[in-house]
Amino acid sequence: MPTFQVAIVGAGPAGYFAAQALQNAQNEDKTFAIDMIERLPTPWGLVRSGVAPDHPKIKTVSKVFEKIATAGNFRLFGNVELGTDVQLTDLQAKYDAVIIATGSSLGRKLGIPGEDLRGYLSAADFVPWYNAHPDYTGVDVPLDTDTAIVIGAGNVAMDVARMLALEPSELDPTDTADHAIAELKKSGIRKVYICARRGAEHAAFTSPELRELPKLEHTNVIISKADIDAAIIAAGDTPEKDVKSNLDAMLAIAEHVKTSHERTMEFLFHHVPTEIKGTDRVQEVVFKTPAGEKVIKAGLVISAIGYEAAPLNGITYEKGKVLNTEGRVKENIYVVGWAKRGPSGVIGTNKSDAAAVIELLISDLKTPKNVGDLSDLIGSHKVITQTHWEAINTAEVSSGEPLGKPRVKVADKTELLRLGGL
């Protein structure tokens, strides 16, 4: 029975679901040996460093990842960076197929004056900062202001706004990075605007997340009923199911009994940012609105208008994603997840996406190479295996237990390697 060797670059949801699809496709004709390569000492991608800490249910998908990782034909190579520790051409030579599952880690730019000012940052920097991503612990997040503006109309924008508008003690029982909780507890922010460039009928929020907002215990949530009434008319008599669910959820917020908390989160639609102004840091944002120009004073601006894939040598990119045809890239290289289709869908979207690409990949396989694997390429490099990761995982979870947290995340790479026993 031939065994084909497959390398997956990236240990996020797309990578794990690709591995699962390979495992499910095994039969008496072919089996697969799967090696997953991850730049960080910790796997799980956005499930660890992207999902909002106050949404722990979403993170339970990690149990599925652990089942995939311990199925017997899977090896984790953490702390190994493609392009530095190993080259793509080497992987192509050793493996029957190479799957790019590196996601989209770069925040899209607004493309307006003032993005270079202190106090402007992308959600692509802010989110990993509060989620203990080792590369983002030093991000400068000035919270010494009373007003923040989040630009975007998707769940990431909503997560960012919620993290800024929450009473920070609500994060104590979560796995938010310790350094972020400490800073948020000193925050002066009491008003957070979510500014969407188009009407509410175009918003990419999802209704379950919207329906949770009125449950915030210490934060007023404001949406103009006039905005939603206008959006319902604009959406027409037969709106798509998702649009209707969204608008219903927003209408419920607009009609919700007003609260009088110290903290407020307010949605503004039809607000197109044209300039960020300030001398040595952000002081105000100029918007184009249907009523004319509008200026909002704020000391922090976070844009959440989408992500692009960080380029890899030897791979062609177009419009922020890997150039591909239904997942095929070139030769024996394939792509899945956000790197393939752009930052769209929820975590589960990656499952069907990966299954379709794996079907193509398997149809392309002919004869196994059997010429070695990653172990031949990395020598004495410190590699985080599944066993090392389980040691890190156990240590973090154990640290969290006495504090009533799911875990205390370690953000320092050296300490992560030490916890893994390296």
Image: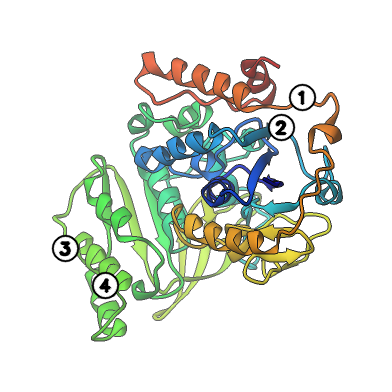
* Amino acid type at image mark 4: Lys
Q: Which mark is residue 382?
A: 1
- Rounded to the nearest angstrom, the CA distance separating label 2 from label 1 is 7 Å
Q: Residue at 71% x, 59% y: name it.
A: 365
Residue 185's spot in the image, x, y percent?
Answer: 42, 30
- Rounded to the nearest angstrom, the CA distance separating label 1 from label 3 is 56 Å
- Rounded to the nearest angstrom, the CA distance separating label 4 from label 2 is 44 Å
Near mark 2 (Cα within 10 A), the count class, few <14, some 14-19 or many ≥20, is many
Q: Quadrant of residue 135?
A: top right
Cβ atoms at labels 2 and 1 below 8 Å apart? yes
Residue wearing tag 4:
244
- Which residue is more in the foreground, 125 or 57? 57
Residue 162's spot in the image, x, y percent?
Answer: 38, 47
Residue wearing tag 3:
255
- Rounded to the nearest angstrom, the CA distance separating label 4 from label 1 is 51 Å
Q: Which mark is residue 79?
A: 2
